[in-house]
Image (tube, rainbow, N blue to C red):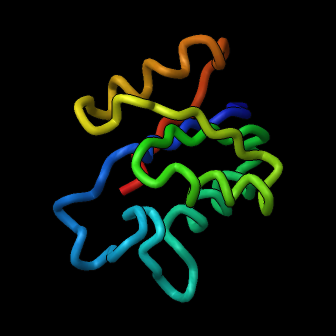
Amino acid sequence: MIKTAVILAAGMGSRIRKRAGNRPKGFLMIDEKSIIEHSISKLIEAGVKTIFIGTGYMKEEYEKLMVRYPQIKCVYNSRYETTGSLFTLYQFKNYIKEDFLLLESL
């Protein structure tokens, strides 16, 4: 069983900025819960033990989740403004050595 997941969430969400307001797009609310927290809850329910989040834009918002969910570890892509999802994924090369589940934040 896969015990590790990666959520790519470094993007600026410029196409959805009007809906997201001043927060990252993963924090859009559905049924009084953010999209990112829906994903986290489902992963934990499925038995995932470690959830890495690739951050960039407003990384502090994602880092706050580490307080509520000890399973989360954030990895920052300092070049998020000029790179894409695959470069964010590349940032995990020294963190993950086993199979993992890959999710896009939105």
Q: In the displayed structure, would residue 2 be above or below residue 58?
A: above
Say which of 77 and 3 sits in front.
77
Q: In the displayed structure, would residue 62 be above or below residue 72?
A: below
Horizontal side, residue 19 vs residue 96: left or right: left
Q: In the displayed structure, would residue 21 be above or below residue 82?
A: below
- Count of marks overlaid on the render: 0
Instruction: Identify the image quadrant of residue 67.
Output: bottom right
Q: In which quarter of the image is the N terminus?
A: top right
Q: Position of residue 35 (x, y in %)?
A: 49, 68
Question: What's the residue at 53%, 62% (across, down)?
Answer: 36
Q: In the displayed structure, would residue 62 be above or below residue 18?
A: above
Question: What's the residue at 51%, 43% (across, down)?
Answer: 7
Horizontal side, residue 79 vs residue 92: left or right: left
Q: Position of residue 81 (x, y in %)?
A: 27, 38
Question: What's the residue at 57%, 79% (across, down)?
Answer: 33
User: Residue placed farthest to the bottom in the image?
Assistant: 32
Q: In which quarter of the image is the C terminus?
A: bottom left
Instruction: Identify the image quadrant of residue 77.
Output: top left
Question: What's the residue at 17%, 62% (across, down)?
Answer: 15
Q: Position of residue 83 (x, y in %)?
A: 26, 29
Q: Position of residue 38 (x, y in %)?
A: 57, 67
Instruction: Identify the image quadrant of residue 80.
Output: top left
